[in-house]
Image (tube, rainbow, N blue to C red):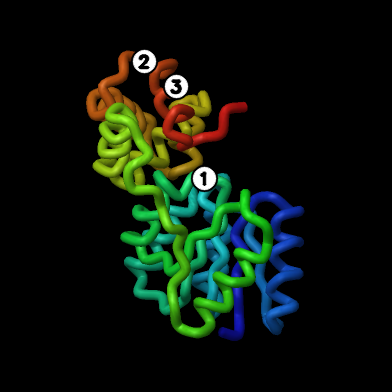
Amino acid sequence: MKSVLIADDHPVVRAAVKLVLEREGFKRIYEASSVGEALTILREHAIDLVILDLSMPGGNGLDVLDRIKTSNLSCAVLVFTSLDPLFFQERCMRSGALAYVSKTNDLSQLHKAIHALMAGYTYFARLPSASMDTLQQSEKQMIENLSNRELTILQYLARGTANKAIADAMHLSHKTVSTYKTRLILKLGVQSAVHMRAFAIRNKLIEDA
């Protein structure tokens, strides 16, 4: 793997990841702080490895994964995020990611994941199989049934982002976002945006700020 893209909107995280990559011998290191920047770099350069955060301006990392998959790009994707693998790892695997590392771990886990991908292996966390109660299992299934775009809009809404701002960020019409919002309320069985936020926090889809 000769070239790598770090897609993360936090400069301190990008700097730390860059140090790890430089120690691993990577020379061509590109950086992106938004979904739009990441997609532009992927179009303009032959990228071998993407270190991808799931929470970024202009959408999220799932949008980048979908674009890589539909464009048949040959880059390997290592998801490096603060979002709980219990709710996101399987979705990322289905979307083509080859590794998932939580930012709550120390950087040695990132080292190990990079080594695994360079050797042709995958690297995923071992998830607990029977630790969730009935409510959590039911809600996890609801989340699994959402499309990547529905999940992205759910995260925006749960953070209190206005429909117009979501439409601008995701290049959608205001009407389309409203339709998604109505659909999410029905799918999740919530009564309002307040309940939607509680649902998202409870299932660690967003951080409780």
Q: Amino acid at mark 2?
A: Ser
The numbered mark at residue 192 is 2
Q: Amino acid at mark 3?
A: Ala
Q: How many angstroms separate mark 3 from mark 1 (CA)?
A: 16 Å
Q: Which of 177 and 173 lies nearest the eye of the viewer?
A: 177
Disc 2 crowd rating (10 Å Cα; few below 14, some 14-19, many 20+) is few
- Tell me what residue is drawn at x 39 percent, y 48 percent: 128
Q: Is residue 119 shown above or below 88? A: below
**Residue 40 drawn at (x, y percent):** 54, 65
Q: Amino acid at mark 1?
A: Leu
Q: Is residue 68 shown above or below 53? A: below
Would you say the residues marked 3 and 1 are in contact, meaning their CB atoms lie under 8 Å apart?
Answer: no
Q: Is residue 171 left or right of residue 144?
A: right
Please, what secondary structure does the residue beneath circle 3 have? helix
Sequence-wise first label, 3 or 1: 1
Residue 179 visible in the picture? no
- Tell me what residue is drawn at x 44 percent, y 78 percent: 121
The numbered mark at residue 198 is 3
Determine which residue is flagged by label 1. Answer: 83
Please, what secondary structure does the residue beneath circle 2 have? loop
Q: Is residue 132 shown above or below 33? A: above
Q: Which of 105 and 8 lies nearest the eye of the viewer?
A: 105
Sequence-wise first label, 2 or 3: 2
- Tell me what residue is drawn at x 41 percent, y 49 percent: 88
